[in-house]
Image (spheres, rainbow, N blue to C red):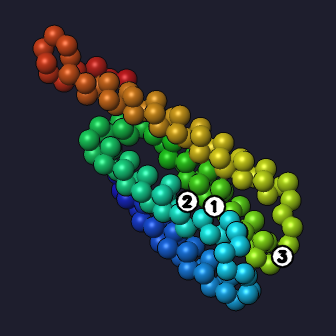
Amino acid sequence: MKKLFNAAFIYMVLGVASGLFYREFTKANAFPEGEYTQLAVVHTHLLTLGFIVLLVLLALEKLFRISRSAKLFGWFFWLYNAGLVLTAAMMVWHGSLTVLGEQSNAMIAGIAGLGHILLTAAMIILFIALGRAVNATAPSAASGTPSAVTA
């Protein structure tokens, strides 16, 4: 649980810092207000996918002990973080190029796509681990008491 809490806190700080970077970087480079750059949504991605999702997951961990399936949960945690960091980094890179008037390239899009693939794989693993945890704590139909069956 401590890993989830610490990661959520780090993403909250990064999300707020990326919003500040967006505002100051675009002002410093006289980027036209209202023109689109991916820098505008990096903070939203970090705050939502990093901070909020991990806080929700922290509550689910407290309720269902998802990490009981430690191997699955570990895979989820590291794949998710790698995917989110990779995706956000590519958004910052692409957005910065836009502000500087430079062209992006297929490599940036490909690496961002890899970040999204990692996020997707992590979410699938999370749902498998969550399903096992929910089923392990589900009441048995006959007795109405929690089942002792583990995944």
Please state if 14 lies on the left or on the right of 94 as rendered.
left
The residue pinned by badge 2 equals 45
* Quadrant showing the C terminus: top left
Q: Which amino acid does label 2 sit on?
A: His
Q: In this view, does 140 lie above or below 93?
A: above
Question: Helix or strand or loop: what does disc 2 sit on?
Answer: helix
Residue drawn at x 53%, y 34% as measured from the top left: 124
Residue 32 versus residue 92 in the image, above or below: below
Tell me where residue 31 appears, x and y as whole percent.
73, 82
Q: Are marks 1 and 2 in contact (CB under 8 Å)?
A: yes
> Which residue is label 1 attached to?
88
Specify the amino acid type for callout 3. Gly
x and y percentages locating residue 88 in the rendered image = 63, 61
Residue 120: percent from left, percent from top: 59, 40
Q: What residue type is labelled 1?
A: Ala
C-alpha span from label 2 to label 3: 23 Å
Inter-mark Cα distance, 1 to 2? 7 Å
Residue designated by label 3: 101
